[in-house]
Amino acid sequence: KAETVVLTAPEGYKWVDGTLTACDYVAEVDGVKYEVFAEAVAAAAEGATVTMLKDTDGDGIIIDKNLTIDLGGYTYSFTGTLVGSTGTKSLGIQVLKDNVVTIKNGALVMTDEAVRGHDNLPGKNMVIQNYADITLENVDVVGNANTTYVVSINSGDVAIVGDTSITATEGNVA
């Protein structure tokens, strides 16, 4: 009878198809590190701070709780599937109502690689759509040629603090 041996990967490593591989952490929440930024935001508890650890890219993000996102001087680039309401999933970040959110210390950039979640095609998008109280502090928010509105404020109080810039391409709205 064969004996099974289980080897636990050391901290900062994981097993991938039988190979010990270093983890590529991009964010941290309350001492727990994540390899996908959107997963860190989703896992964060009410009132937590999500801290980015390096430049990274990925899908759109839904924020449905009071939260601080500290980009840590790094850039999050939207290169994957965007989020939003059914039939209009064209948002980099969707901040849902009745929340207080701060995004600070870095950059959010919409890229040409981003695709709408409802049809998997590139097209008109927004970097941030907000329905809550939001503070943008020392953050650059940058749209691309498909970004009709870089930051769309539908409701809630908005504070633009410090060295914050909101950049739209010609013909689009910051």
Image (cartoon, helix red, strand yellow):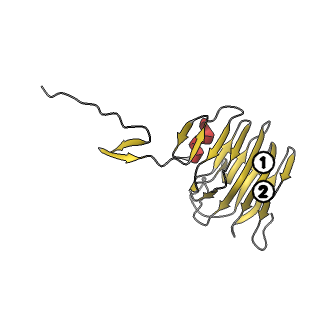
Quarter of the image for the C terminus: give it. Answer: bottom right
Which residue position is annotated with label 2? Answer: 151
Asked whether the residues under the numbered discs 1 and 2 touch, taking CB atoms below 8 Å apart as contact, a structural biologist would say yes
Q: Residue at x 76, y 67 (%)?
A: 168
Three-letter code, disc 2? Val
Which residue position is annotated with label 1? Answer: 130
User: From what the image shows, is residue 94 above or below residue 145?
Assistant: above
| Neighbours of disc 2 within 10 Å: few (<14), some (14-19), many (20+) | many
In this orientation, which residue lies closer to the viewer: 34 or 81? Answer: 34
Look at the numbered disc 1 and give the secondary structure of its residue.
strand
- Point out the tag, 1 or 2, that comes first from the N-terminus: 1
Farthest left residue?
1
Three-letter code, disc 1? Asn
Q: Residue at x 64, y 44 (%)?
A: 51
Farthest bottom residue?
170
User: From what the image shows, is residue 26 above or below residue 64?
Assistant: below
| Neighbours of disc 1 within 10 Å: few (<14), some (14-19), many (20+) | many
Give the CA distance from mark 1 to mark 2: 8 Å
Percent position (x, y) of residue 12? 44, 42
Q: Residue at x 74, y 48 (%)?
A: 103
